[in-house]
Image: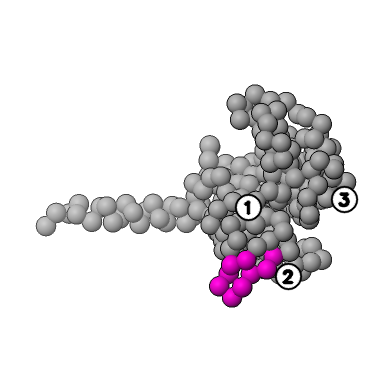
Amino acid sequence: MNPFKTLPTLSFLFLTLFSLAHAATFDIRNNCPYTVWAAASPGGGKRLDQGQAWQITAASGTTQARIWARTKCNFDASGKGSCETGDCGGVLECKGYGKAPNTLAEYAIDQYEHQDFIDISNIDGFNVPMEFSSNSPGCTRVIKCTADIVGQCPNELKVPGGCNGPCPVFKTEEHCCNSGNCQPTNFSRFFKERCPDAYSYPKDDPTSLFTCPTGTNYK
């Protein structure tokens, strides 16, 4: 009998337990006075009336993840339909990202030096006010974007139910920064002045990207 025969199974079990130990939970609550259809990638989607909550879990190592709200949605019994803002391919249970404009909570779990990276982004515009904060005593980080951006939105960026980001509208290097070399614009400054914690353009890391120690849970 080979005493090492079960090592792959044991190694898999160890890795699974390690990932579970460093998983993060996200408590998503609708504090708006209207219904939203919460969305998460990874995670899916769920209708939330005012005051309702939904919890999702992200495994250790999750990157490029986001949570957002969809507004004025209609779905049939099979979960197919559409939303005025934040629509993710016409389904209730999102499999990918939502359509701009949408206020985004973005995160990556258990990255460099066992840190979680979190942010709120207006690069894809704004549709609902958002707070993204720690739900654990080991981190006190609170990020907010709660200004009346829809009401004050520049005419060039206005869309039904939201305020678009300049990149989805103009699709130029100046606003999208595909080469990685760009500066703030008057449109990005509009968002930054109202939500200083949030990303306003792609190179806005110094004032918009925050960390919490891995093991933090969020709300």
Do the residues bearing badges 2 and 3 touch, measured as CB atoms within 8 Å? no
**Quadrant location of the N terminus in the rendered image:** bottom left
Mark positioned earlier in the residue sequence (2 or 1): 2
Closer to the camera in the image, 48 or 210: 48
Q: Secondary structure at mark 1?
A: loop
Which three-letter amino acid code belongs to the residue tagged 3?
A: Gly
Instruction: Find the residue positioned furthest to the top.
Output: 181
**Residue 147 visible to the viewer:** no
Q: Is residue 29 above or below residue 150?
A: below
- Neighbour class for label 1 at 10 Å: few (<14), some, many (≥20)? many
Q: How is the image coloured?
A: one colour
Do the residues bearing badges 3 and 1 touch, measured as CB atoms within 8 Å? no
- Residue at image x 80%, y 35%? 187
- Measure how far apart labels 2 and 3 are at the Cα level: 23 Å
Which circle marks residue 98 in the picture?
Answer: 1
Q: Which residues are magenta?
A: 73-81
Q: Is residue 186 left or right of residue 173?
A: right
Closer to the camera in the image, 105 or 188: 188
- Measure how far apart labels 2 and 1 are at the Cα level: 20 Å
Would you identify the image quadrant in which residue 17 lies? bottom left
- Residue at image x 58%, y 69%? 79
Residue that carries the numbered disc 3 in the rendered image = 151
Which three-letter amino acid code belongs to the residue tagged 1?
A: Gly
Position in image of residue 82 (x %, y %): 65, 63
Mark positioned earlier in the residue sequence (3 or 1): 1
- Measure how far apart labels 3 and 1 are at the Cα level: 22 Å
Residue that carries the numbered disc 2 in the rendered image = 49
Which circle marks residue 20 in the picture?
Answer: none
Do the residues bearing badges 2 and 1 touch, measured as CB atoms within 8 Å? no
Position in image of residue 204 (x %, y %): 70, 33
